[in-house]
Image (spheres, coloured by chain):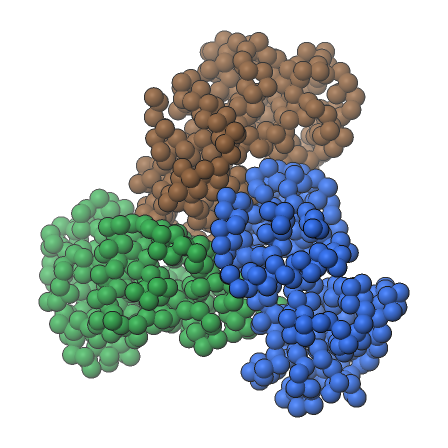
Chain colours: A green, B brown, C blue
Amino acid sequence: MPKLDSIIDAQQFDYETLACVFKIAREMEETKCGDLLRGKIMTSLFYEPSTRTRLSFEAAMKRLGGEVISTENAKEFSSKAKGESLEDSIRVISGYCDVIVLRYYKEGGAKRAQDYSDVPIINAGDGAGQHPTQALLDLYTIKKTFRDIQGLKIAMVGDLINGRTVRSLSYFLAKHFPDNEIFFISPGRVRMREDIKGYLDRYRLKWNEAENFNGVLSELDVIYQTRVQKERFEDDQAVYEEMMAESEKLIIDRQKLERMKSSAIIMHPLPRLSEIRYCVDKDPRARYFEQARNGLYIRMALLKMVLTGY
Amino acid sequence: MPKLDSIIDAQQFDYETLACVFKIAREMEETKCGDLLRGKIMTSLFYEPSTRTRLSFEAAMKRLGGEVISTENAKEFSSKAKGESLEDSIRVISGYCDVIVLRYYKEGGAKRAQDYSDVPIINAGDGAGQHPTQALLDLYTIKKTFRDIQGLKIAMVGDLINGRTVRSLSYFLAKHFPDNEIFFISPGRVRMREDIKGYLDRYRLKWNEAENFNGVLSELDVIYQTRVQKERFEDDQAVYEEMMAESEKLIIDRQKLERMKSSAIIMHPLPRLSEIRYCVDKDPRARYFEQARNGLYIRMALLKMVLTGY
Amino acid sequence: MPKLDSIIDAQQFDYETLACVFKIAREMEETKCGDLLRGKIMTSLFYEPSTRTRLSFEAAMKRLGGEVISTENAKEFSSKAKGESLEDSIRVISGYCDVIVLRYYKEGGAKRAQDYSDVPIINAGDGAGQHPTQALLDLYTIKKTFRDIQGLKIAMVGDLINGRTVRSLSYFLAKHFPDNEIFFISPGRVRMREDIKGYLDRYRLKWNEAENFNGVLSELDVIYQTRVQKERFEDDQAVYEEMMAESEKLIIDRQKLERMKSSAIIMHPLPRLSEIRYCVDKDPRARYFEQARNGLYIRMALLKMVLTGY
């Protein structure tokens, strides 16, 4: 049986562990709750707010009978304001609880935390770094739909340079499911970075790059849409406006729906702005809310694995 | 048996359901806690802070063995900051839990949420709109004191134009207990609005209007005092000062206590500023803290009804 | 058996109660969790943030099977913003729960709260006032190490004029353990205040005062280091810089470690800035993280004593 202690990044998962996560997530989906983690305490230690992720982890913990202590804005409110290091905070808080779910504002926070913690750390996003539980739930959503993650044409769409989720998903696909084809579709200014493309090449996962859906839309099995991260372009209004204009043609709307395969699915890590029209929500191919709910089952599975040794 | 799904506004309650809420609240007051909601999760989704209301709901849920996940300032902290719609947030969060208690900053929020939620919504106030659980606890407080809500002279005092609670209470009285008399007592500038007066007329509930207690104080059974909502007059210092001056004579103090009936009660939705003097607190007719506590029992009753189908 | 209702200040503890707190804390350390407080609700009512203290209390409550409702920033978010008095807030909230843990921004808050609460108040710090549970965990840490708090040379180091913890600890030592010797070591500007020195004299606890460790370091049994509270000197950059310069020589580093007794311990209420070098952490004499963890057991003991009457 694979061992799962802290959950820091996508790289730590081998194929066997992935299969195990998905199997337990599926069980969670069926049983929905239990007493497995009775008497265990999880700390939500969020140095920047992420209500969705935090509530998802907390619901997961509580569905399994565990308890939660929580801070929503550790950066502003905690002793951090007095200048305490992450390492010291982790040492203290790991003395109170059985697992820490950490959201940090700088890359590498989860790894640093792990080195000083007496209890497992689960990385709930560290700046431009990783957000491994999001990548796992994305993969789980694809797997639930197609059973085998094989022979699929998968488009990743939007602001690919800043998108943490598309990077992690690409990583997972290359390493464990290389027999698929990826289409990176984005405005020219925010293309997928070279490191990931190189990684895909190394694992011989075929990829393409374009600035629109022309020609490929009707062949896609998965459209993974993402929002333009406005806040990253705040300083440059001209660039921002150019970005928004180019993003217009990537919006999923009724016209695009008509050209898509009937078996395709549309995913989105949420929050969604205008990059998927609201009218799309009612289409059975729209899976982003189901995808969010899968996050609950994935996090239940991970908490179980980390806290009971599965 | 009446069915109670979401709790959105006062209008949805018929007489039978009201009676049922009060009966269960009374039972809650006696048993105080239990295991009824074990395994259920409530989300406190507050887009603006209201610590009192939030803690009251959360205590109610926990007294019944349920669990809570919570955000105190969804507007500032959540993905709302990135521009997500209420509807999307509700869809995601309703996938995590069994009931959502929603505080929203704009009228109609609870109704919009209900349309997109997979689980019941309980409206904990939506802007200038409704706050139905407050109205229910007000009514319950009157009922507990007088048994029959009939033949009572009820004064609503203070800033009636902005007061959400007096509006809802008037509504309930008109529809279900028209055999009473209401006195609207306020500075001229912040009188009760015409819509409510028209509504009272329709149900033939007798009402009066005045700018002071002259003549009527010694006849009143219920004085429902409210605070001047300073924040609504921030932009106009002159109006604010005029308001405060006229409010002076509406303050409940020792002199007014002496002229009141010994069987009368003084209510207030809290927070209280200077509109009831602290010396009044010790008088047995002061019921505002008991009224707040009744909120706990009402909310326990509502959570039970919504989550177990009663 | 001594009776413990609210926990407001260090003065209320007699020797017998102290012994009882420590005995129960030791039991908590061994059993770690239980069902003792099942069905009880604690409110964390924090008028200023103190994540460490809040999470410690909440973990303590949950380890004993109790429930928590919580607000992290009552000052900014609650009805306080509308001008409600502490007394009114306490009256309302004490109607929801079984115990209130209160952090207030002004001295005397806990006492005021106690006067109006229907349930026990535990003071989690009130401005420049007291923070009794911190003093108890400090004392407990010394007791666990040396068994008898007797014949020890105890240095209190740093910003002694603003340090709440060193004041309370001095108080406890004088009253219950006078057979020790205290060394106040601080920059001249932030010496221990006269009131505490007078108190020590009254109980004949021997004390000394210096601006550095010269001569005494190798004799000390306990070094209680504290941080310079930068925020107290914000207005005067010159004073602040002078303070920091004089504090330099008080920093615990590798050189000082070499001159200390092998049986000595280093304590710190945390958060720690640069006044203890990180390299010290690995030395077995560094006890500040264990000290923080002792806070959990002390708070479990206090909650048990307050809620079940022990």
Q: Is residue C196 above or below residue C5?
A: below
Image coords of residue B236 (percent x, y): 65, 37
Q: Position of residue B80 (x, y in %)?
A: 42, 51
Q: Is residue A64 visible?
A: yes
Asked if residue B270 lies left or right of residue A46, the reply is right
Image x and y of residue A27, in percent? 24, 55
Who is closer to the viewer here, A269 or B147?
Answer: B147
Q: Is residue C69 left or right of residue A293?
A: right
Can residue A130 be seen here? The reply is: no
Residue situated in front as seen by the camera: A270 or A28? A28
Looking at the image, residue A277 lies above or below residue C232: above
Count of all numbered marks drawn on residues in the image: 0
- Which residue appears at 34% of the width and 72% of the height? A9
Q: Residue at the spot x=18%, y=47% of the render?
A: A284
Q: Residue A19 location in percent, x, y?
A: 21, 66
Image quadrant assignment for residue C196: bottom right
Give the residue displayed 50% in from the left and 32% down from the top: B31
Q: Nearer the viewer, residue A57 or B86?
A: A57
Q: Residue at the location (33% across, 61% down)? A: A304
